[in-house]
Image (tube, grey):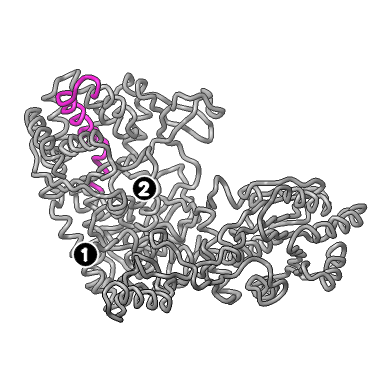
């Protein structure tokens, strides 16, 4: 067996990267432009060999690309000549560019570690719970996981076949002929997708520490929701005076400015429901609740409408200073006591996120709230799956 | 591999007809993944270090893209080992095989490579084993810290430098000779220095080596392929990374001006600095559209002397600031000096760099740079 040194080295590198993220997550997560071209870009000096570098921008050897560009006195694009040294990578500066998904995964690990949420297992597309453990396989593993085999039915089937064919009452299982499996009962199958609409207030008051709290909450929500739904459809809205739908990358690279019209954010979120067939529809709204004068009543009405149209509305009052809850948030807090599909979270720090998620996770598991929300795995006996399709 | 046996024999024969000579070459067809692994570590069996992990990740990602992926790797060993990427097309692998013979000839004939360590695979394996033993005996963290520090200062080696006094002005040699290290620590420093010298030689001959290999590749394929296939190859060669193209253009210029015999001489006696200094002309600079770019002023300087100076500086100091040991004759403290006037060092990296040197030197380390004196001792960094 080949020792894969590259992978081992990569693992060691990732351990250091995790450690770095652990120590610097707050700083990183507050970057206004968190995602650029799908990547989280950062210069992690501790993950570089600390060779000395020049401080100022120095001249470098370059080559014309033939293309006309904006920069340069000649108006031609300039391409630095790299790889002049060759050999190994020793002494080369590695700019750490984390894929955004990888960044989220690492951030989730760090956050989960901090808030000690229970580990959740991934839900597979078939609606079964995946575990981190190796699946228990037997010789018949080409047919599928042992847990899918309906042993009782299979053995009976085998016995009957052996009596019929060979005249002996023996269990000589031929899975191709005898195999019975637990499968989802078609009548119980549900759409496993969820629609999650994230609505973020980007008015002037939503600064770096506000964004950090929201992002942490979102990353942890993703962690929980991804284990509940095999596929999620996520859409993003930002609003200030007006609301706009954004891509994921844009949502995580926003500039705060302008006033707060919560109603516009809610309206845009509801627009996104048109034509949607997902089973569970979630709305997550993050704001400091300081809605502009004149918008209060409209926002109340829009919230009522949203509660009718979304299965769950989660309102995050972003409050890193830990001040009292006022304005529109106070109204939502009060309303949440009466409306079962509205939850109010006062996002002050990681502890309050933890509290919110502890309430939210049992809800997702069907242990609390609307247990009907989504589908759980149901096995069914006696439904024969074609052996060929189970391989 | 069998499908390439005939073409390898044909290419080898053509290479010898061109006047090349080389050690036996062992070809291995392998995955992009293994190529990324070897390219990130520099050698297939080198000790495992987190830093290679970052490079591996980067190269592996590049390998998945069609452009700028690594098609082959050759090791300067006896016999030479060459890795061909399994996903290469048949034509790509023919190019690669011809290119590999260019490298093998360079390794066997270039003057500077005569003193290179052809047994580096064995050495690297022994180093890796020793480091693992040290980790068990002295603790993983201790050895890791030492390795990090060694790799940080290892860029200061110069495989060409033979004058002992001048070598001692380079941090790595000074530490190896004078730092108060335990035996196992000194062994680690020595092992890293040896590996660094192996790579230093490759870095100082990168342009000439790649240029020669590309030139040989082109010459062999011109004989091997029909006009149509050759035209395709010629286009591919022009799209190679700049260093390959620069070296190739210089050898084409030498061949056209003075003939193949002179090209063979140049590959025997030159290294990058001499090649660039003697052979690069204004005409070639213009043709390759090379220039020195000043990002502050946003100006280009395409004068051959400026381009040469920049290239030579890159080759001499690997693009790193020039740091010298000020007094290498004795004393507990170590004083380093940044000798380039008018250039400043990135202050954010100074503390980390000095901490790495201090890990090895154990006593106070000073650095004169940016018009200040930085001192790193047990208490950390102080500035005067």
Q: Is residue A328 left or right of residue A85?
A: right
Residue on which disc 1 sits: B127
Q: Nearer the viewer, residue B49 or B349?
A: B49
Residue A300 higher or lower than B254, as above or below: below
Residue on which disc 2 sits: B322
Q: Nearer the viewer, residue A157 or A192?
A: A157
Q: Position of residue A247 (x, y in %)?
A: 64, 47
Q: Quadrant of residue B289?
A: top left
Residue A274 higher or lower than A169, as above or below: above
Is residue B224 part of the magenta span, yes or no? yes
Answer few, some or many: residues within 10 Å of disc 2's Cα (few below 14, many 20 plus, some between 14 and 19): some
Q: Quadrant of the N terminus of chain B?
A: top left
Q: Are marks 2 and 1 on the same chain?
A: yes
Mark 2 vs mark 1, foreground winner is 1
* Residue at far bottom of view: A169
Mark 1 chain: B
């Amino acid at each position: 067996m080949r020792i894969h040194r590259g992978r081992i080295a990569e693992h060691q590198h990732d351990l250091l990267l995790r450690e770095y993220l652990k120590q610097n997550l707050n700083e990183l997560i507050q970057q206004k432009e968190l995602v650029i071209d799908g990547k989280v870009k950062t210069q992690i000096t501790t993950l570089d060999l600390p060779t000395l570098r020049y401080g100022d921008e120095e001249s470098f050897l370059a080559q014309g690309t033939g293309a006309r560009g904006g920069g340069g006195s000649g108006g031609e694009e300039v391409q630095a000549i790299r790889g002049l040294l060759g050999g190994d990578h020793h002494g080369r500066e590695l700019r750490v560019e984390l894929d955004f998904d990888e960044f989220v995964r690492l951030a989730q690990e760090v956050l989960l570690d901090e808030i000690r949420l229970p580990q959740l297992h991934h839900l597979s597309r078939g609606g079964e719970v995946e575990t981190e453990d190796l699946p228990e396989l037997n010789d018949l593993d080409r047919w599928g996981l042992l847990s899918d085999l309906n042993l009782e039915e299979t053995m009976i089937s085998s016995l009957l076949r052996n009596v019929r064919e060979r005249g002996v009452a023996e269990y000589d299982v031929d899975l191709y002929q005898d195999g019975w499996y637990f499968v989802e009962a078609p009548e119980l199958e549900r759409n496993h997708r969820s629609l999650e609409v994230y609505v973020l207030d980007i008015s002037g008051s939503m600064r770096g520490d506000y964004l950090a709290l929201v992002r942490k909450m979102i990353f942890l929500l993703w962690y929980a929701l991804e284990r509940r739904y095999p596929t999620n459809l996520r859409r993003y809205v930002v609003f200030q005076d007006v609301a706009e739908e954004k891509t994921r990358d844009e949502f995580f690279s926003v500039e705060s400015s302008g006033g707060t019209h919560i109603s516009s954010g809610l309206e845009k979120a509801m627009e996104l429901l048109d034509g949607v067939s997902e089973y569970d529809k979630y709305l997550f709204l993050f704001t400091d609740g300081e809605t502009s004068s004149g918008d209060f009543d409209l926002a109340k009405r829009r919230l009522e409408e949203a509660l009718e149209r979304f299965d769950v509305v989660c309102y995050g009052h972003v409050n890193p200073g830990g001040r009292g809850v006022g304005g529109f948030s106070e109204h939502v807090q009060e309303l949440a006591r009466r409306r079962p599909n509205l939850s109010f979270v006062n996002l002050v720090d990681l502890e309050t996120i933890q509290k919110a998620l502890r309430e939210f996770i049992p809800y997702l598991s069907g242990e609390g709230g609307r247990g009907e929300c989504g589908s759980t795995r149901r096995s069914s006996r006696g439904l024969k799956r074609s052996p060929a399709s189970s391989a | 591999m069998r499908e390439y046996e005939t073409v390898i024999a044909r290419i080898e024969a053509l290479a010898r007809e061109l006047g090349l000579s080389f050690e036996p070459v062992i070809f291995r067809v392998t995955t992009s993944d293994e190529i990324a692994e070897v390219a990130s570590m520099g050698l297939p069996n080198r000790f495992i270090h987190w830093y290679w992990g970052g490079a591996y990740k980067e190269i592996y990602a590049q390998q998945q893209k069609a452009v700028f992926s690594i098609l082959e790797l050759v090791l300067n060993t006896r016999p030479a080992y060459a890795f061909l990427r399994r996903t290469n097309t048949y034509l790509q692998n023919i190019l690669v095989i011809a290119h590999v013979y260019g490298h093998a000839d360079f390794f066997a004939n270039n003057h500077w490579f005569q003193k290179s360590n052809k047994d580096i695979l064995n050495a690297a394996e022994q180093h890796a084993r020793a480091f693992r033993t040290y980790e068990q005996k002295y603790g993983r963290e201790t050895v890791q810290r030492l390795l990090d520090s060694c790799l940080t200062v290892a860029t200061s080696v110069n495989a060409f430098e033979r004058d002992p006094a001048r070598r001692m002005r380079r941090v790595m040699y000074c530490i190896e000779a004078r730092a108060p290290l335990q035996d196992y620590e000194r062994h680690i420093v020595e092992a890293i220095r040896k590996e660094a010298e192996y790579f230093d030689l490759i870095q100082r001959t990168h342009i000439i080596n790649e240029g020669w290999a590309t030139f040989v590749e082109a010459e062999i394929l011109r004989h091997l392929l029909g006009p149509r296939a050759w035209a395709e190859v010629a286009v591919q060669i022009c799209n190679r990374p700049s260093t390959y193209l620069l070296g190739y253009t210089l050898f084409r210029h030498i061949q056209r001006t003075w003939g193949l015999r002179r090209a063979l001489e140049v590959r025997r006696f030159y290294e990058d600095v001499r090649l660039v200094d003697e052979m690069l002309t204004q005409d070639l600079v213009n043709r390759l559209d090379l220039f020195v770019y000043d990002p502050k002023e946003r100006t280009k300087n395409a004068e051959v002397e400026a381009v040469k100076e920049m290239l030579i500086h890159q080759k001499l100091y690997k693009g790193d600031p020039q740091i010298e040991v000020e007094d290498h004759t004795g004393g507990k403290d170590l004083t380093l000096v940044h000798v380039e006037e008018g250039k400043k060092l990135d202050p954010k990296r100074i503390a980390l760099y000095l901490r790495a040197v201090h890990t090895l030197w154990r006593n106070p380390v000073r650095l004169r740079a940016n018009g200040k004196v930085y001192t790193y001792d047990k208490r950390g960094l102080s500035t005067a």
